[in-house]
C-alpha cells in the first residue's frame, strides 16, 4: 500500500479487519516520509504488520524505480523508529521455517530448534542432537520475503517490463473492468515467474511480452487458495489469501487504485488443503 | 503504388542517397496487414500532436502518445452505446441498503411510545471508537451500516439485549453476527412453530424406525449387530449453557438477518476435530471427517459458541453472582450472574498487568462433552433400558468421572498456556498519551478476538476466519482401526489338499482294511457255521 495515501487507502481493507489507530496513522504519515528521504527511495510502501505476542512489527518497504528487484525492507515497533531488515538469504529462509510458534516482539529473541539425527546403522546407531538457533530478526526478514514471493500480487498490466528488463509502473494502466476483476487470471504474482516457462507454446504466443511477464493467480495450487469478493456491490474487489491468512489485496475496478497489506501472525497456513 | 515508381526514379537519374530515401519512405508507407495503418502516417500524427501540445519530457511518454494515437483511430464518434449505463451490482446493493436509511417515523400517524423500556440497541459507534484506538475493528461506515441493521433487528424482534458479536470472514461472503437475548417468554412464542415442526419430524423418524424393527422381527433372518451406539448427549435448553444466547447472521448489512439454530453437544465436539473455512452460504454442506451433522449454519453456530466461551471477557467485578441464588446448591455450577451496580471500574494500568487477574470470563466453559453442565451418560442408559437389567448388572458400567470446567467468572490467569505462549496479550492503546489510553486484550488462542475496557465500559469483538490457533499443524482424525477378523482356529482353517499319491495310498489302505475285515467276517461266519 503506497505510503502517500495510506490514510485513505487503509479504509479499503477495513472490512477485513485491518485498521490502524489514529496514533499509528499519524506516526506513519510522518515517519515514512522521513524514511523515504533518508534512504533515497523512489517510493515507500506500507507493507503491513506482523503480530507478536508482546509487540507488533510494522513493516515498510522502500523501492527503487525498478520495483521488482530493488527492494529494501524496514521494520518498526512504534511506527516511528525504523530499522533495516537484513536481506533474506536462502539459508536464512530454510532455517526460519524450523521456528515454531508466534513472533515474540523482541527482535533479538532466539528460537531454538533441536533436530535429532541418527548416526550409524543397526545397533550402533547413536542419536545426536543438533540445535539450530534462529534469530527473530532473521525470521522476520525471511517471512516478509516468503510472503512477498508467495502472495504479493498486482493487477494485470499495472506493471510493464521495459525492453531493458526494468519493471516499472505502467503509466497507461487504467484499472481492470468489473468483469475482468472477477477473474483470477487478471491478477499476477509480483515476482520473477516460476511456471511461465512451462506453458505451452500456443499459450505463450498469445502473451503480450511487456505485460504478461509474471505468473497469473489462476495457476496457483491448490485451487481455491484465494478468496475473491466484491464489496460495495462491485465498487471494490478484495482478494484474501488463504495460504497466508491476513494478506489482503484491494482494487477499485476502473481506477488505478490498488494495493495490498498483510496483517497477521506471520505463519503460513499449512492446513489449507484440509480446510477447503 | 511504389512499384511503378521505381523505374521512373531510375529514369530520373537520382543519386544514391535519394534512392535510399525513397526506398525507406515507401517501406514506412507500407500498410500493416492487421490494422491497415502505416508507420509514416502514425509518426506524423504523433509528431504533429507533440508539437501542438508541447508536453514536458515528451520522450518519456512517447509510448503512451503512440498508444493514444492508435486508440483514437478506432474510437467511434457515434455515442449510441456509451450512453447506456450498466445497472451494476453496485446499484443493486445500494438499493438493498436503501431501506436501512428509511426513517422509523416515515410512516405517518405512528407515534413512537416514549415510555418504552430502554432500547437494547448498543451504542456501536462509541464502541467502534474505542476499538479504533486499539487498531481493531472495521470501517466506520461499515460499522454504521451494521448499526442500522441491528436497529432493524431490534425493531422486528422482541429483544432484551443485543450485541454486535463480530464478523466472520468466509471465502465467498462474510458473516456479520449479532448476539441477542429475547425478552422473557417472548422467545417461546416465536420458537413454537419451529419446535412443532421438529417434533413432528422426530416422531415421524421414530415411527419409521419402529416399523423397520417390526419387519425385522417378523423375518428374523439377518443377525443383528450387538453394537449399541453410545447415548447421544442431549442438547442444552434455550437460555442455558451453550444455548444461552441466540445468534443472528447476515451477509451484508441490509440483507435479512437469519437466525442460527441451537447447537448440540455433538456438533461442538465434532467441530473441535475439524478445521474448515466458512464459505458464506449458510446452507453449504460441511464435508469433513469425522462427519459433521448439519450444514454450515450449524458449524457456524458451534464455532460461535466455542469462541464466545473462550474469549468473552469482562473486567473483574463488573458482573457478580446473584446473592439469592448463591445459597441454592453448593455443588452445582452457578450459571447466572447480574451486573454489579457498584462497579467502579478498574484502573487501566491494573488491567494490562501481565498476571491478568483483573479480567474474568463471563461465558461458561464448554466441557469436552460439548455441554456446559455435565450430563451423566450412564445413569441415563439405566433408566432407558430397564428391561435389560440383567445385562447391565453383568457389565457393571464404570461410573464415569464427571467432567469439570472452570466456573463462571474465573480470572484469565487460570487460562491454559498455548505451548509456551501466554493465551492473552494485554496492551495499552497508546504509548504516547498513556493518560487517556484504554486497556486492550488480544486473544492468542483465538486470533481475531479482542476486548477493550476503559472505566466502566468494556466490549468484546471477534473479526477473523473463525479458527483456533495451534502451534502444531492440523492433522485430521484418522479413521478407526480395522475391525478384527474372526479368530482363526482349526475348525475354520483350510487344510491342504492331499496329493494323488497320498490319495492312492489311503485308498489302498482302506481296501486292505476292508478285505481284512471281510476275511475276518468270513472266518467268523465259518466258525459260527462250525459251531
Image: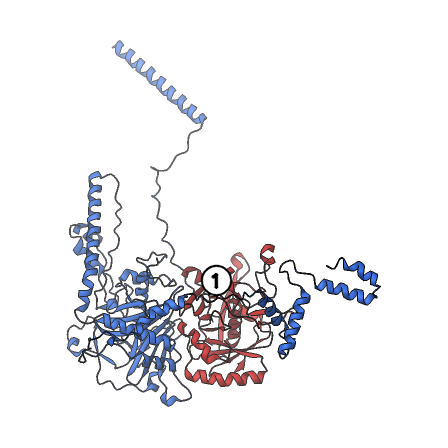
Chain colours: A red, B blue
Relative vertical location of residue B523 with respect to residue B384 in this rendering, above or below = above
Q: Residue at x 25, y 44 (%)?
A: B224
Q: Is residue B149 left or right of residue A174?
A: left
- Residue B478 is drawn in which quadrant? bottom left
Instruction: From the viewer's side, name the closer residue of B91 and B480.
Output: B91
Disc 1 crowd rating (10 Å Cα; few below 14, some 14-19, many 20+) is: few
Horizontally, residue A62 falls left or right of residue B207, namely right
Q: Position of residue B191 (x, y in %)?
A: 20, 63
Q: Nearer the viewer, residue B336 or B73?
A: B73
**Which residue is the site of mark 1?**
A183
> Can the viewer see residue A97?
no
Q: Is residue A137 above or below residue B270?
A: below
Q: Is residue B122 in view?
A: yes
Image x and y of residue B334, in percent: 21, 73
When the figure is inspected, residue B155 is found, relative to residue B275, above or below; the finding is below
Tell me the residue at 77%/65% (across/down): B22
The count of marks equals 1
Q: Secondary structure at mark 1?
A: loop
Residue A52 x %, y %:
44, 76
Please, which residue is most extreme toward the top here?
A: B530
The chain under label 1 reads A
**Nearer the observer, B42 or B490:** B42
Which of the image's four quarters has the C terminus of chain A?
bottom left
Q: Position of residue B361 (x, y in %)?
A: 29, 75
The picture quadrant where one finds residue B290 is bottom left
Amino acid at each position: 500500500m503506497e505510503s502517500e495515501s495510506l490514510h485513505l487507502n487503509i479504509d479499503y481493507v477495513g472490512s477485513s479487519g485491518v485498521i490502524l489507530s489514529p496514533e499509528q496513522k499519524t506516526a506513519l504519515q510522518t515517519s515514512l516520509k522521513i524514511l523515504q528521504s533518508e534512504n533515497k527511495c523512489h517510493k515507500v510502501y506500507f507493507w503491513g504488520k506482523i503480530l507478536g505476542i508482546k509487540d507488533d512489527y510494522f513493516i515498510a518497504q522502500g523501492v527503487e524505480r525498478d520495483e521488482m528487484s530493488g527492494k529494501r525492507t524496514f521494520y518498526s515497533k512504534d511506527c516511528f523508529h525504523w530499522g533495516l531488515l537484513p536481506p533474506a538469504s536462502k539459508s536464512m529462509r530454510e532455517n526460519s521455517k524450523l521456528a515454531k510458534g508466534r513472533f515474540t516482539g523482541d527482535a533479538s529473541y532466539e528460537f531454538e530448534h533441536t533436530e535429532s539425527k541418527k548416526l550409524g546403522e543397526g545397533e550402533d546407531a547413536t542419536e545426536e542432537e543438533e540445535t539450530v538457533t534462529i534469530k527473530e530478526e532473521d525470521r522476520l526478514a525471511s517471512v516478509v520475503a516468503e510472503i512477498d514471493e508467495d502472495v504479493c500480487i498486482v493487477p494485470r498490466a499495472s506493471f510493464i517490463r521495459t525492453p531493458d528488463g526494468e519493471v516499472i509502473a505502467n503509466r497507461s494502466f487504467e484499472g481492470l473492468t468489473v468483469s475482468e476483476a472477477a477473474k483470477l487470471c487478471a491478477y499476477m504474482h509480483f515476482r520473477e515467474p516460476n511456471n511461465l516457462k512451462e506453458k505451452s507454446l500456443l499459450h505463450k504466443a498469445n502473451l503480450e511480452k511487456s505485460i504478461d511477464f509474471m505468473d497469473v493467480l489462476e495457476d496457483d495450487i491448490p485451487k481455491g487458495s484465494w478468496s475473491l469478493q466484491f464489496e460495495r456491490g462491485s465498487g471494490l474487489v478484495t482478494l484474501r489469501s488463504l495460504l497466508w491468512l491476513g494478506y489482503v489485496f484491494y482494487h477499485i475496478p476502473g481506477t488505478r487504485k490498488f494495493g495490498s497489506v498483510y496483517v497477521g501472525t506471520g505463519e503460513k497456513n499449512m492446513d489449507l488443503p484440509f480446510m477447503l | 503504388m511504389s512499384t511503378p515508381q521505381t523505374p521512373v526514379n531510375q529514369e530520373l537519374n537520382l543519386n544514391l542517397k535519394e534512392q535510399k530515401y525513397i526506398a525507406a519512405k515507401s517501406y514506412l508507407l507500407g500498410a500493416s496487414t492487421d490494422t491497415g495503418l502505416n508507420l509514416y502516417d502514425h509518426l506524423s500524427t504523433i509528431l504533429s500532436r507533440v508539437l501542438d501540445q508541447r508536453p514536458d519530457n515528451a520522450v518519456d511518454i512517447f509510448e503512451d502518445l503512440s498508444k493514444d494515437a492508435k486508440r483514437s483511430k478506432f474510437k467511434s464518434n457515434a455515442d449510441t452505446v456509451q450512453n447506456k449505463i450498466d445497472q451494476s451490482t453496485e446499484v443493486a446493493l445500494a438499493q438493498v441498503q436503501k431501506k436501512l436509511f428509511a426513517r422509523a417515523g416515515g410512516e405517518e400517524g405512528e407515534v413512537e411510545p416514549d415510555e418504552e423500556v430502554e432500547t437494547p440497541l448498543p451504542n456501536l459507534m462509541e464502541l467502534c471508537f474505542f476499538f479504533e484506538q486499539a487498531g481493531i475493528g472495521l470501517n466506520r461506515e461499515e460499522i454504521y451500516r451494521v448499526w442500522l441493521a441491528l436497529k432493524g433487528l431490534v425493531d422486528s424482534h422482541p429483544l432484551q439485549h443485543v450485541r454486535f458479536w463480530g464478523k466472520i470472514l468466509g471465502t465467498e461472503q462474510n458473516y456479520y453476527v449479532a448476539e441477542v437475548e429475547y425478552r422473557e417468554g417472548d422467545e417461546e412464542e416465536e420458537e413454537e412453530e419451529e419446535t412443532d415442526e421438529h417434533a413432528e419430524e422426530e416422531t415421524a423418524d421414530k415411527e419409521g424406525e419402529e416399523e423397520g424393527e417390526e419387519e425385522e422381527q417378523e423375518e428374523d433372518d439377518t443377525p443383528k449387530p450387538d453394537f449399541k451406539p453410545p447415548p447421544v448427549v442431549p442438547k442444552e435448553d434455550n437460555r442455558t449453557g451453550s444455548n444461552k444466547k441466540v445468534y443472528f447472521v447476515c451477509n451484508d448489512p441490509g440483507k435479512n438477518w437469519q437466525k442460527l439454530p441451537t447447537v448440540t453437544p455433538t456438533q461442538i465436539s465434532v467441530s473441535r476435530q475439524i478445521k474448515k473455512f466458512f464459505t458464506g452460504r449458510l446452507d453449504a454442506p460441511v464435508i469433513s471427517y469425522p462427519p459433521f451433522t448439519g450444514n454450515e449454519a450449524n458449524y457456524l453456530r458451534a464455532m460461535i459458541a466455542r469462541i464466545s466461551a473462550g474469549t468473552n471477557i469482562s473486567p473483574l467485578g463488573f458482573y457478580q453472582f446473584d446473592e439469592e441464588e448463591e445459597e441454592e446448591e453448593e455443588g452445582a455450577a452457578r450459571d447466572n450472574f447480574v451486573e454489579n451496580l457498584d462497579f467502579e471500574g478498574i484502573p487501566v494500568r491494573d488491567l494490562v498487568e501481565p498476571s491478568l487477574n483483573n479480567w474474568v470470563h463471563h461465558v461458561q466453559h464448554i466441557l469436552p462433552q460439548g455441554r456446559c453442565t455435565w450430563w451423566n451418560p450412564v445413569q441415563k442408559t439405566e433408566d432407558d433400558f430397564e428391561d435389560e437389567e440383567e445385562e447391565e448388572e453383568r457389565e457393571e458400567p464404570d461410573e464415569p468421572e464427571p467432567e469439570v470446567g472452570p466456573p463462571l467468572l474465573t480470572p484469565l490467569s487460570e487460562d491454559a498456556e498455548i505451548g509456551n505462549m501466554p493465551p492473552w496479550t494485554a496492551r495499552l492503546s497508546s504509548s504516547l498519551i498513556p493518560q487517556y489510553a484504554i486497556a486492550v486484550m488480544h486473544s492468542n488462542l483465538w486470533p481475531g478476538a479482542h476486548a477493550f475496557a476503559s472505566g466502566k465500559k468494556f466490549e468484546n469483538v471477534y473479526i477473523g476466519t473463525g479458527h483456533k490457533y495451534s502451534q502444531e499443524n492440523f492433522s485430521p482424525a484418522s479413521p478407526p482401526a480395522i475391525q478384527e477378523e474372526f479368530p482363526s482356529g482349526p475348525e475354520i482353517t483350510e487344510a491342504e489338499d492331499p496329493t494323488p499319491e497320498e490319495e492312492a495310498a489311503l485308498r489302498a489302505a482302506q481296501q486292505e482294511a476292508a478285505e481284512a475285515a471281510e476275511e475276518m467276517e468270513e472266518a467268523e461266519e465259518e466258525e459260527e457255521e462250525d459251531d
